[in-house]
Every structure is written in structure tokens, then in C-alpha cells.
Image (cartoon, rainbow, N blue to C red):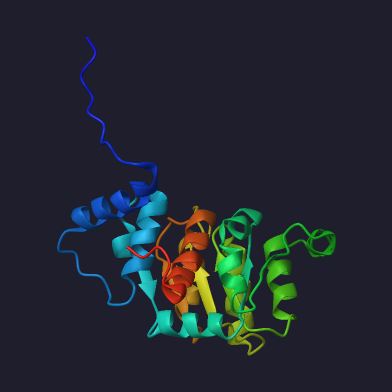
Amino acid sequence: MKREIELENVRPMDIEGRSFEIITEELGDKKLIPGTELIVKRCIHTSADFDYADNLCFSEDVVAKAMEAIKEGAVIVTDTQMARSGINKKALARYGGEVFCFISDEDVAAEAKERGVTRAVVSMEKAAKMNKKIIFAIGNAPTALVRLYEMIENGELDPALVIGVPVGFVNVVQSKELIMQTKAPYIVARGRKGGSNVAACICNALLYMINNDRLY
């Protein structure tokens, strides 16, 4: 016998708002770091995973620093085309910013093959040569985070922000811990969880906070 299933009657334009109402209700009296609430809630909204209320780590004053960098025209570099496609480019363009992903570039693929490293490593090196204020949004490749760590520690790179949320098992946890040991501003999802969608949604949360769009 089929059991009766009751659906909520929600208008299409109200679905996102209702989703954030549910997230807020289920978080209850959970204490989030002031100023990071929208980022945490958007990660939960994107993934339906409330662990982000506990595993997201923020360096000191990172949200204010990241928003200031965006206002000053910072570009965003991702490690996947998926993350690049998910970022609101129109909102970023208001401040002169663009989104780049070099992972599919022929020169990157050729050099990675020649050196025996991942394309993500070469992509980070290529980005570092841009001579721009850069926000790195890494949702897939721990090797990208490891290379960023090395360049930061060697004084070759001074990123405006590192969003370190790769998902997986091999060196994922370790690469995130390395980034949190640097002087760079960071937003990191500690542990194995993350993904390109989470990297993009953190970027979008920062943009929405600046533009005062779709706040919940």
C-alpha cells in the first residue's frame, strides 16, 4: 500500500527562501562565526550537508579581506571548469573581476605531461604569473593546494584568498591543513568533504554579500 506523502505548497520564486528557512530552523541555536553565516548556509544549501556548520574554517577577518579584494578587481582562478561555470560572473564583473580556469589549456596539459605532474599544479603556476590580485577557488585537486602552499611559503605568491575545499581521499585532508598553516587568508572545509560546487558557492556568497543580493 502506498503511503501518503505531503508536499509543501511553495511558489517557484519562494523555493530558495523556504530552503534557507529550513536550514536556519535545523541549525537551531548552533553558533556560527559572526560574518560567516551566509557562507556556511550557502554551503549547506548547495550540498544539503549540515557538516559545513562545523568543518568550515576561516582565517582571521577573511570575509572582510575577501570582499575588499573583490571590490579592488581581484580575479578568481578555479581548478575545474565546473567551478568556473558556477560562479556568478556578472556579479564579479561589476568590480572588474573575471574568472579563469587553465586546466584545459593545451600548454598546461603538455607541460604537465612532460614534467609528470598534474595539470592542476601547472595551472596554479600559470595563474601565479598573471600579476593580478587572485582568489583561488579549489574544489577538486589537492595537488593545486599543495603547489599553492609551496609558492606561498617560498614567497612566490601572495593570494588575496585561498578557498580550499577539494573533495576526496588522497592528500585531501593534508593539503587543506597545509593551507591553514600559511599566512594567506583562507576559507577551508576541513576533512574530506567539499567539491567544485562548494568552491563556487563560497565565491557567490561573497559576491552576494557585497552586492546585497539574495541574502538569507
How many numbered dots are placed on residues in this image?
Answer: 0
Q: Quadrant of the C terminus?
A: bottom left
Left or right? Give the position of 182 relative to 84.
left
Judged from this view, the residue extending furthest toward the top is 1
Q: Residue drawn 43% across and 55% down?
A: 193
The answer to which image quadrant residue 94 occupies is bottom right
Q: Residue drawn 73% across and 68% down?
A: 122
Q: Position of residue 111 (x, y in %)?
A: 82, 65
| Residue 182 visible in the shown view | no
Left or right? Give the position of 51 relative to 127.
left
Judged from this view, the residue extending furthest toward the left is 29
Between residues 76 and 22, which one lies in front from this camera angle? 22
Q: Position of residue 93 (x, y in %)?
A: 62, 72
Q: Position of residue 118 (x, y in %)?
A: 70, 60
106 shown above or below 181: above
Q: Residue drawn 28% across and 75% down?
A: 33
Left or right? Give the position of 212 relative to 160.
left
Between residues 80 and 7, which one lies in front from this camera angle? 7
